[in-house]
Image (cartoon, grey):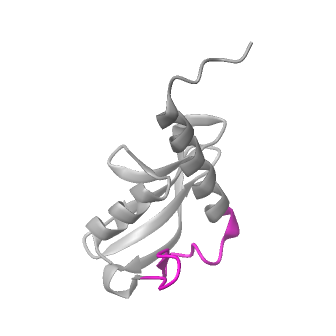
Amino acid sequence: MDKDELTAWALKNGWQVMAGAPSLTKPSNPKEAIVRMAFKATVVNLEVKKPAGKWEKVSGEAYGKIQPDPDTGVPQGLGFEKIPSFSMLMQENKDAQVFASMGGMGKRR
């Protein structure tokens, strides 16, 4: 998968582009990215934001070695399959996007 394919997959699965990188946000603070894909010339890194605000690389792989899972489409090689919390965070972000797109849902009193 290349940068464009990874970005397209991410945007379909709850990620949003923040500061130029596909990112996942905190459910409690949707304006703060806590996971991002940092694209380099030949590799993509999966980074997590530490409480102090610094980004830490948790995995990385060359574009040519990243392949979509034949059943789910999830990019294999970046560590998504090894860290279940990423799947949960992606689902929470995707659900938040769906509910936000519904709009018109007034506040409950």
Q: Nearer the viewer, residue 72 or 28?
A: 72
**Nearest the camera: 4 or 61?**
4
How far from the left and from the top, in percent, is residue 54?
53, 49
Q: Which residues are magenta?
A: 68-85
Q: Horizontal and vertical percent for residue 49? A: 56, 51
Based on the displayed image, in which of its 4 quarters is residue 87 positioned?
Answer: bottom right
Identify the residue at image location x=38%, y=70%. 44
Q: Is residue 69 magenta?
A: yes
Image quarter (top left, top right, bottom left or bottom right) of the N terminus: bottom left
The answer to whether residue 108 is left or right of residue 20 is right
Q: Position of residue 33 (x, y in %)?
A: 51, 44
Q: In this rendering, is residue 76 above or below 52?
A: below
Q: Quadrant of the C terminus?
A: top right
Q: Residue placed farthest to the top in the image?
A: 109
- Asked if the magenta segment contains residue 79, the reply would be yes
Q: Is residue 38 above or below residue 1?
A: above
